[in-house]
Amino acid sequence: MLVQSRFVFAFLALSALSVIACGFSEKAEAQVSPKPVTMNHPGPKPVLVELFTSQGCSSCPPADAVLQALAEETEKGEAEVIALSYHVDYWNRLGWRDPYSQAAFSDRQRIYARHINDRGVYTPQLVINGQSGHIGSRQREVRAAIAEANLLPVEIEAAATWSKQENTIRIDYNLSETRDQATLQLALVSTEVENEVPRGENRGRHLSHTNVVRELISIEQTDTKGSYSVDLPADLQGNSDLAVVLFVQNTRNMAVLGTSALVVPSLASGDARGR
């Protein structure tokens, strides 16, 4: 059931982005500064797709599957997408409280509704580069829109690394430029989550989700280089599938001006990879 309730971005194709990691222990990890950024890199530009979804919506699992496929294809080098999933809270009153939902994500979707030419606020809604909205389960339409957005020019290049000490993570970022009316957004992401749903429209189903945003933090950006420390929420402490992504967003029209890769540390190799 489709329910009516009423960021152009740039990506640095990171050829060598690493975090020296010693697992998720309480020992300080060595820090690696992000490499200098350059403009006008060759090849397609990855597209930021943001899916607004809910475990209380029976139309959402197909869209969740589309987002998962896009993320997996990107990891294999077969697509150019940074996929994020936001769980809204306005379905919670209908029998099942989505454990990943936040009112802040519903508010973010409403802000988009004021800026993009779409049908308002609904699930599953997929927003591309902060500029267009699509029904997330319409795979052909979504892929066509992504292919078109891949060709748009780069505006701001961005790179990021992160390290962890106890229950605090430090993010170091490097941008090619700063702009007025722009803010730096930091998304803390669980790359894979799953659970049973005992009530609501998806009652009895086992649902899985990819790149679920758990916290979205706005950072005051005054220079092209900087660092930011975050105390992890209790439910993310010790999380083995934590990832981060930074993006620069125009606060006037919600266009995404630049983004880092979704940086996922590998506990086995001590490397970090973009996804």
Image (cartoon, helix red, strand yellow):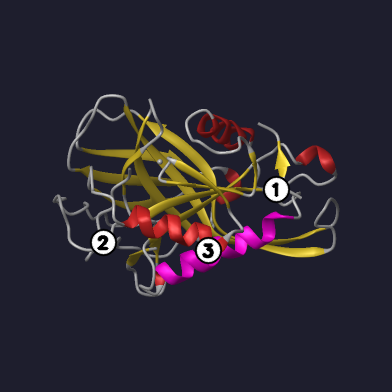
How packed mark 1 is, by other alpha carbons closer than 10 Å (few <14, some 14-19, many 20 or more), is few
Residue 70 lies in magenta, yes or no?
yes
Q: Is residue 183 left or right of residue 208?
A: left
Asked whether 115 or 22 is in front, the reply is 115
Q: Which of marks 3 and 1 is nearer the N terminus?
A: 1
- Above or below residue 194? Residue 50 is above
How packed mark 2 is, by other alpha carbons closer than 10 Å (few <14, some 14-19, many 20 or more), is some
Amino acid tagged 3: Arg
Residue 99's disc is 1
Residue at the disc numbered 2: 17
Tell which tag, 3 or 1, sits nearer the viewer: 3
Is residue 92 something one can see in this rendering? yes
Tell which tag, 2 or 3, sits nearer the viewer: 3
Name the spot of residue 50 as percent of width and height, x first: 50, 48
Q: Do the residues labelled 2 and 3 touch (CB within 8 Å)?
A: no
Residue 12 lies in magenta, yes or no?
no
Label 3 element class:
helix
Amino acid tagged 1: Pro
Q: Which of marks 2 and 1 is nearer the N terminus?
A: 2
Residue at the disc numbered 3: 140
In what quadrant of the picture does the C terminus appear? bottom left
Q: Which of marks 2 and 3 is nearer the N terminus?
A: 2
In three-dimensional space, the C-alpha distance between marks 2 and 1, rounded to whole angstroms, equals: 32 Å
Q: Give the range drawn in magenta.
A: 59-74
Amino acid tagged 2: Leu
